[in-house]
Amino acid sequence: MVVPFEQTTLEKGLGGSNEPFLNKPARYTHLNMDNAVRRGKDRETLARLISVFEQVNDLGNGDQALVAVLHHILPMESRVVTFDAARFGQFVSKSRLLKLIEMLLAQSCEGETLALSVALLFELMAKGTGNGLVISSHPANQSGASSKEVADIDVFEADGKTPRHCAEAKDKPFTRADVDHAAGKVAEAGHTSLIFIYGPNAKTGENLAALVQEYEGKGFDLTFVPARAFAEGNVSLAPSVTPVEVVDLLNKHLALMRAKEVTIQHCKEVIERM
């Protein structure tokens, strides 16, 4: 009950997770200190939450407690990007899609806008192929944290398991070590190719062509692509999409990435200016 209320009425104001980190519903039906949560802050939060609920039970003032909670959370800023349908046509033209990407990348937001843009572009590619590809983006600096996460953005076949593409999104200066780290995560997961997409704030002193050749000699297919070129290639082949579809895709990946408030606000401003 709490999850749909938070995602609809509160417009994901508490984060929009469908699996609250303190009480994963697939496994636990009650709050308990035996619940599997990360040590440190998460476990401390779980302990405080249990303590608060015990006090509410003892005092019998659950209704008052609920009102107090709603008083604090209802004014919270929505984490959902919306748009004025009257300002958009029936479809988003390719030139407008490229403008959207350009405007998103105008503010790096610690690299989150590049990752968001890459995810959106892969979604457009998937819609064009029509074979049910699954696009998965991940919280910043957490790619590889689970068996289903390999790179910043992963593209899977329709089964959601077999990888089609693994993409690293880098919008800051990078070195050979950054490339090796990204490629290493992919190789450790048993895959042999990586698309390294770099944004307008990325700079490097590395010889990228030499790196590609070196990795090719190891049987690994490494590709470097500027974000602008990646956008132009994908958008040129994209099918017709509606404004609703574009905004829904942005919201999907803002949630998957657990994007920062500054990133969400930037997206809202970009959509308002489109």
Image (cartoon, rainbow, N blue to C red):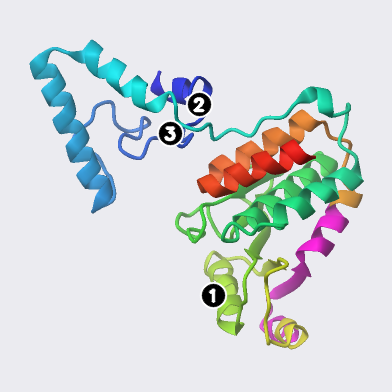
Distance (Cα) linking label 1 and label 3 = 33 Å
Q: Residue at x 13, y 25 (%)?
A: 54
Q: Residues within 10 Å of mark 2 (few under 14, many from 20)?
A: some
Q: Which residues are magenta?
A: 213-234
Q: Quadrant of the N terminus?
A: top left
Callout 1 touching callout 3 (CB < 8 Å): no
Q: Residue at x 55, y 48 (%)?
A: 262
Amino acid tagged 3? Leu
Residue 202 in which image quadrant: bottom right
Above or below, comparing residue 14 to residue 208 in the picture: above
Residue designated by label 3: 14
Judge by depth and name the residue closer to the eye, 228 or 165.
Answer: 228
Instruction: Tell me if residue 156 comes above or below residue 198 in the rendering.
Output: above
Amino acid type assigned to the residue bearing label 2 in the image: Gln
- Residue 129, numbered circle: none
Mark 2 vs mark 3, foreground winner is 3
Label 3 secondary element? loop
Q: Position of residue 92 (x, y in %)?
A: 86, 36
Disc sitting over residue 7 in the figure: 2
* Quadrant of res 84: top right
Direction from residue 172 to residue 48 in the image, left or right: left
